[in-house]
Amino acid sequence: MRITTWNVNGIRAVLGKGLKEWTLAEKPDVLCLQEIKANEGQLTAEQKDFPGYASAWNPAVRPGYSGVASFYNSEPLEIVKGIGVERFDLEGRVLRTRHPDFYLYNIYFPNGQRDHERLQYKLDFYEQLLKKCDDLHAAGESIILTGDFNTAHMPIDLRNPKENVNTSGFMPEERAWVDEYLRHGFVDIFRQRYPEKVQYTWWAYRLNARQRNIGWRIDYFLVSEKLASRVRDVIIHDDVVGSDHCPVSLLID
């Protein structure tokens, strides 16, 4: 099974930059998109039509902001929008689909922003989502979390760690929440398989950051520990353009 995640920074924009063509060539079983910035009614029938796929959408209430969508070639057993907390669910940040032997979360984690005004909101989101995951783990379920985590976990995960210690996305309290997920039965499967590999998934638009590869790895697959042995590979498609993020694919048996 191939699961692909991609923060597209506006689905209507990236549709004009080859999203559909790339998807149909790669043929993921599930495609998880974040920051879609649109609802289904804002797309034409042709734009929404990915041959061989059905989809679920969870847009933000605020127009042109946030939102997630999942495309799949096999109907999930269950589709749940949000995490049941209104202040997060208004922003369309989570879609959970149930598959035969795991739950898949498509997530757009909040950005703490430059002035940190949203930092506590972001940390609260991490906490509330982990509670949901703890309940599923306690019930014996397996989970795959994917999407834009908006946090680089370790110094290897961004080009300039020393310069960004006080930048949201690499602040100690944000990184600590990733640690907490790893203590609660999850594995950062890319880093487990490639402990010393330097590869990024996001580059700022300014200062030719992508061309100079001044990036951050903030798009992840965290998988339940008992799923880790089934993972065949994690691929960061850093040659794929169209957004300030690139797609990442998980191959799992």
Image (tube, grey):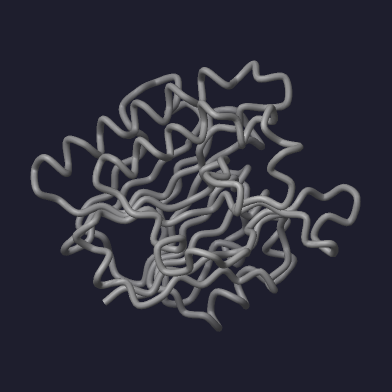
Query: In this orientation, which residue lies closer to the viewer: 216 or 68?
Result: 216
Residue at the spot x=60%, y=20% of the render? 118
Q: Is residue 41 left or right of residue 15?
A: left
Q: In the image, is 19 to the left or to the right of 130? A: right
The location of residue 41, given as percent across then percent down, is: 56, 46
73 and 203: which one is in front? 203
Quarter of image, res 188 = bottom left
Counting from the top left corner in percent of width and height, residue 105 is at 35, 49
Answer above or below: position of 72 versus 86: below
User: Is 24 located above or below residue 76 in the figure?
Assistant: below
Is 27 placed above or below 245 here? below
Q: Residue at x 8, y 43 (%)?
A: 139
Q: Quadrant of the C terminus?
A: bottom left
* Viewer-closest of 59 and 191: 191
Q: Position of residue 146 (x, y in %)?
A: 42, 53
Q: Is residue 41 visible?
A: no
